Amino acid sequence: MSDLILHHYDFSNFAEKARLMLGFKGLAWRSVEQPPILPKPKLLPLTGGYRRIPILQQGADLWCDTRLIARELERRVPSPTFFPDGTRGHGEAIAWWAEHQFIRPTALFVSGINAEHMPAGLHEDRARLHGLPPPSIEAVRAAAERNRHLVRPQIKWLAEMLEDGRPYLLGGQPCIADFAAYHVVWFYRGRHIDCRAEFAPYPTILAWRDRMAAIGHGKRTEMNPDEALAVARYASPGKPRPSQPQDGDPRPGELARVRPADNARDWIEGEVLFIDADEIALLRRDPEVGEVAVHFPRLGYDWRRQH
């Protein structure tokens, strides 16, 4: 049985990216369904307060954010690669656009069109995450229409990347850009009201979307959240690779705290276990799971020393 565990929920677009990456690498994995909104009592003991989905777990190690999950999967299974020759810089830049500029108006558009069909409390939860008051259904619907006009030019950009007939965004093989852009396109299926008509004028996007979907999710086996907690409790964090701190970085053994840079307000605190230009891992202790290592990407996250 696989020792890779994915904490996710089915309608999460970022979780779809992780599921597809696991499928691309041909991996078996265990699926732990987590709630889409707080409280998350079977997740937060593992992460120390980090609430976002998905999270990849192996034993007492947790990898947060799909950018870092991609790097970890690539390190374990180098082929097939997320970074074919000649694509890395372009692919990472397109992925950053998709996950920071394309997804936000997409989420507001699709969730707004489906305002009355989203899980109870979701709109209020996401508003709190951004420091905003709970919105009315009317406000959510109005935001959908405003953001429809922000997604359409970006959909056109995506179509233009494929207009020369290439099967994937940067050539003949899928790369990290494809996985990042695909999960945004996947989200248009909505919850009850399908929003995929936005792609009807672009047959190249439809064909590319279907090629990406055909990759599949690998071998998924369901797992109870309590089992995942027990896995961490009876394991120890893996031995870290040698750290390569940059100027000003905390060193292994020092105390630090980390949080997403965009809208998170809660810090995750612990002892630096590993750090390099791409990743920082904190060793932390929780009475429910014992000692765990929580891994974060550097880009898109803030860190501070604790004194």
Image (tube, rainbow, N blue to C red):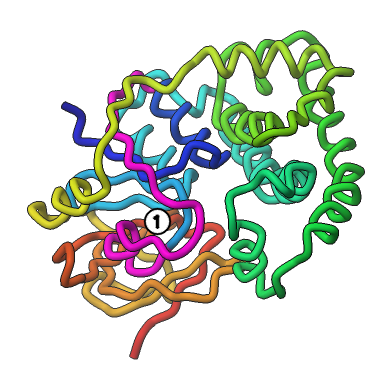
Q: From the viewer's perspective, is residue 12 above or below residue 181?
A: below
Q: In the image, is residue 158 above or below residue 201?
A: below
Mark 1 residue element: strand
Location of residue 148 in the rendering, given as x and y in whole percent from the top left corner = 87, 42
Q: Quadrant of residue 27?
A: top left
The quarter in which the N terminus is drawn is: top left
**Left or right, residue 147 beside residue 271:** right
Is residue 132 magenta-colored?
Answer: no
In the displayed structure, 75 sits above or below 44; it is above
Residue under the image location 60 percent in, 39 percent down: 92
Label 1: few (<14), some (14–19) or many (≥20) C-alpha neighbours in 10 Å: some
Count of numbered tags: 1
Q: Which amino acid does label 1 sit on?
A: Glu
Could you tell me if residue 153 is visible in this image? yes
- Residue 186 placed where, x, y %? 64, 29
> Which residue occupies the extreme bottom position in the image?
307
Residue 278 sits above or below residue 126 on the image: above
* Residue 39 placement: quadrant: bottom left
Q: Give the range drawn in magenta.
A: 24-50
**Viewer-nearest residue: 204 or 126:** 126
Query: Residue 15 location in percent, x, y?
Result: 49, 39
Front one among 172 and 21: 21
- Would residue 90 be visible to someone looking at this image? no
Query: Which residue is pictured at 29% across the width and 79% down the height?
Result: 255
Residue 46: in magenta span: yes
Mark 1 = which residue?
279
Could you tell whether 68 is left or right of 188 in the image?
left
Q: Position of residue 128 (x, y in %)?
A: 62, 71
Q: Which residue is drawn at 44% across and 46% down?
A: 54
Where does the C terminus fall, quadrant-wise?
A: bottom left
Residue in the image at 42% along x and 22% along y: 217
